[in-house]
Amino acid sequence: MIGHTVLRYEEVSSTNDRAKELLERPDADGLAVLALRQTKGRGRLGRSWFSPDDKGLYLSIIIKRSFSGNTPMLLCPAASLAAALAVEKMSGPDVYIKWPNDLIVNGKKAGGILIEQIGGAYIAGIGINLNTDPSGFPEDIKGKATSLMAESGTIWDRNVFTREYFALFEQLLSKISGGAGGDVLEKIKARSFTIGKIVDVRDGCRSFHGEAVGFEGDGSLLLKAPDGKILNIRSGEIK
Ligand code: BT5
């Protein structure tokens, strides 16, 4: 069960790093690490995650179970969708998912997902700006980032949110490991900030341009290039 044990810390470098140290525990699958602040919160590709004290959700969940086929590729969609559904369940603002890992509220980034693989285990890192005051965001993200509090006008209870998140993520994990990943992708499509838009996608030194038209079964983005060709993009970043 996701969240069967929750280890809570005042401060860690990164909850993903702390989770990594716990991978060999016999009860590792589903174990969660929660911190009030991170001194080296991370995004993808070595980017940093702004993690002010006591304002956000800094959560990592160890997933160490056997998966078949392309299921692990669906961990990021499942973790993103669980966040959107948890916000919805708590009557929050609509959350859109910008492929592959951004949680968007009213056009701004309110959270992000970082999935890391270590051997046969995965760590799902979930960062959400619950009660962050937007005036405190660093200059480079000011104007692009927001928080649930800023968008809803209410204070978000981290513990209640986390409980909802655990239950929803568990349900979605059962779906993807039970072969119903298509359902998850359909639900993401309905909340997608990407599908239907003309986008530029950067993947390392490659870049692609076209209309985002859908997802492949493994969560890859399908892009219709100007010449009509459909490109299948497994990872990258939308500019
Ligand atoms: C992500 O990366 O969006 C994944 C973030 C995952 C953070 C969680 S917190 C718990 C766990 N422990 C960790 O150490 N990490 C995970 P990426 O797509 O690479 O986006 C990173 C970019 O988002 C940065 O380069 C900034 O532009 C922007 N950013 C940084 N902090 C932000 C924040 N608090 N809110 C909104 N945008 C932010």
Image (tube, rainbow, N blue to C red):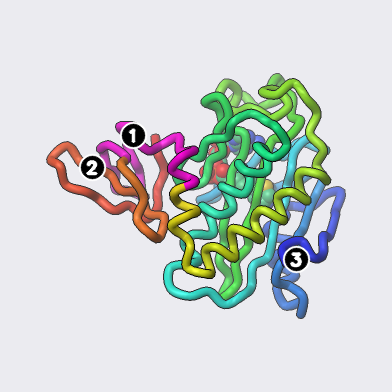
Q: Which mark is on residue 214?
A: none
Residue 175 lies, in percent from the top left, at 55, 63
Secondary structure found at label 1: loop
- The picture quadrant where one finds residue 8 is bottom right
Mark with earlier residue (1, 2): 1
- The picture quadrant where one finds residue 144 is top right
Q: Residue at x 72, y 55 (%)?
A: 166
**Amino acid type indicated by mark 3:** Leu
> Quarter of the image containing the C terminus?
top left
Q: Residue at x 28, y 44 (%)?
A: 223
Q: Which residue is mark 1?
A: 196
**Amino acid type indicated by mark 1:** Gly
Q: Which residue is mark 3?
A: 31
Q: From the image, state whether disc 3 or disc 1 is nearer to you.
A: 1
Q: Residue at x 57, y 47 (%)?
A: 81
Region of the chain picked out in magenta, as a range: 187-212
